[in-house]
Image (tube, grey):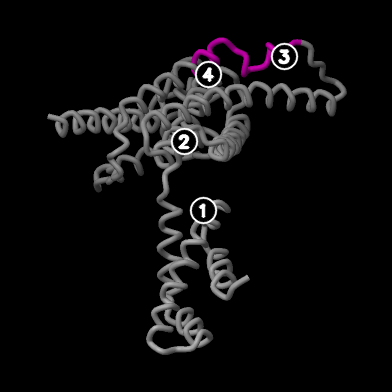
């Protein structure tokens, strides 16, 4: 192996390129270094001195930085198996975290459909956002989003069945007869998944792949609204178990003692007499809806 080939091989190990790209670039780099060496030889240098001078004067840091930037900003094309593998692993991890959090925070099944809807919305948003950041052509974005939706749908069903089987085996007192009794096979949840998937695919169809800059700037008012929504949601989920003062105020205000309550994601029913809406969630949903409509109107105005 020549000096330049060894040098190029060592240099390219520090880059983020894949193997084929490294091989191609290695040949180009060796050729480039040989041309520089030939120039030094023409100036009267010896073979060894010209090689040493070429390597010495070659700007390693700028080269590696430039190559890594290229690798980072490089867009994928076609149906990319590696991408599909990575995105589905990511979605599975997010799904597991969200579902564990859901089952930990909410003991009842009354709001499971709403929670599942929110979980799937977030999952498919990640799918959409990941695709538009990794692919340039619209057809590639649409195809990879669609395939990911199908793959994740199948993984969710198969995964929950397997986990349920394992859980039943480990728990001797439980029986597992009909897999269609599992929540992932509930008709409402399947319908939610397909409708949300179709919406995400439709959004990707109207997405402009040439708009590399996406405006996610938040004003002071936006941050204030989000912060207020967060505080209200925290209060909502802590009441009435933790917030004694708030419990006392509501009891005095409505002249009622909290004997029992029924809490869902959307509302709390106290003693079957008073219903308190989750204002924090409502505020957040209105904010998202407002931003979504504003972005659509902004896009339309730019087109005109």
Magenta includes 181?
Answer: yes
Mark 2: which secondary structure?
helix
Q: Along the horizontal axis of the image, is 274 left or right of 95?
A: left
Residue 194 shows in the view: yes
Query: Which residue is tagged 1?
Result: 21
Question: In the picture shown, does residue 69 fall above or below 168?
Answer: below
Give the mark nearest the N terminus, 3 or 1. 1
Please state which of the two labelled residues, at mark 1 or mark 4, is closer to the viewer: 1
Which numbered disc, 2 or 3, marks the residue that appears first in the sequence? Answer: 2
**Circle 4 residues within 10 Å: few <14, some 14–19, many ≥20:** some
35 and 181: which one is in front? 35
Q: Is residue 162 left or right of residue 154?
A: right
Q: Range of the magenta residues?
A: 178-193
Vertical side of 39 occupied by 201: above or below: above
Name the residue at 40% across, 63% down.
Answer: 66
The structure residue drawn at horizontal position 62% and vertical position 25%, both measured from the top left corner, is 156
Looking at the rendered structure, the secondary structure element under dot 1 is helix
Q: Which mark is residue 126?
A: 2
Residue 60 x, y percent position in the rendering: 46, 73
Q: Which secondary structure type mostly characterizes the magenta part of the structure?
A: helix
Report how far apart the C-alphas of labels 1 and 4 lie in the structure: 47 Å
Callout in the foreground (4, 3)? 3
Location of mark 4 (residue): 113
The residue indicated by pointer 3 is 179
């Amino acid at each position: 192996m020549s000096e330049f080939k060894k040098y190029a091989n060592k240099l390219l190990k520090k880059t983020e390129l894949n193997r084929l790209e490294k091989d191609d670039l290695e040949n180009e780099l060796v050729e480039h270094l040989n041309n520089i060496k030939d120039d030094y030889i023409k100036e009267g240098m010896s073979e060894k001195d010209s090689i040493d001078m070429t390597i010495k004067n070659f700007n390693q840091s700028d080269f590696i930085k430039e190559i890594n930037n290229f690798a980072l900003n490089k867009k994928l094309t076609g149906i990319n198996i590696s991408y599909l593998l990575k995105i589905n692993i990511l979605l599975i991890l997010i799904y597991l975290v969200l579902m564990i959090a859901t089952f930990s925070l909410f003991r009842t099944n009354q709001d499971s459909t709403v929670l599942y809807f929110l979980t799937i919305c977030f999952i498919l948003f990640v799918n959409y956002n990941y695709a538009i950041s990794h692919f340039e052509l619209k057809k590639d974005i649409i195809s990879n989003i669609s395939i990911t939706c199908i793959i994740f749908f199948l993984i969710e069903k198969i995964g929950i069945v397997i986990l349920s089987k394992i859980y039943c085996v480990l728990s001797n007192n439980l029986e597992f007869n009909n897999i269609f009794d599992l929540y992932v096979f509930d008709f409402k949840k399947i319908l939610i998944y397909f409708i949300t998937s179709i919406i995400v695919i439709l959004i990707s169809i109207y997405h402009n792949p040439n708009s590399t800059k996406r405006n996610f700037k938040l004003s002071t008012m936006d941050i204030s609204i989000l912060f207020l929504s967060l505080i209200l949601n925290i209060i909502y989920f802590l009441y009435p178990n933790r917030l004694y003062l708030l419990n006392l105020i509501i009891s005095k205000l409505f002249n009622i003692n909290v004997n029992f309550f029924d809490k869902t994601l959307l509302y709390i029913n106290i003693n079957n007499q008073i219903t308190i809406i989750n204002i924090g969630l409502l505020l957040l949903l209105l904010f998202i809806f407002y931003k979504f409509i504003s972005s659509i109107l902004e896009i339309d105005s730019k087109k005109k």
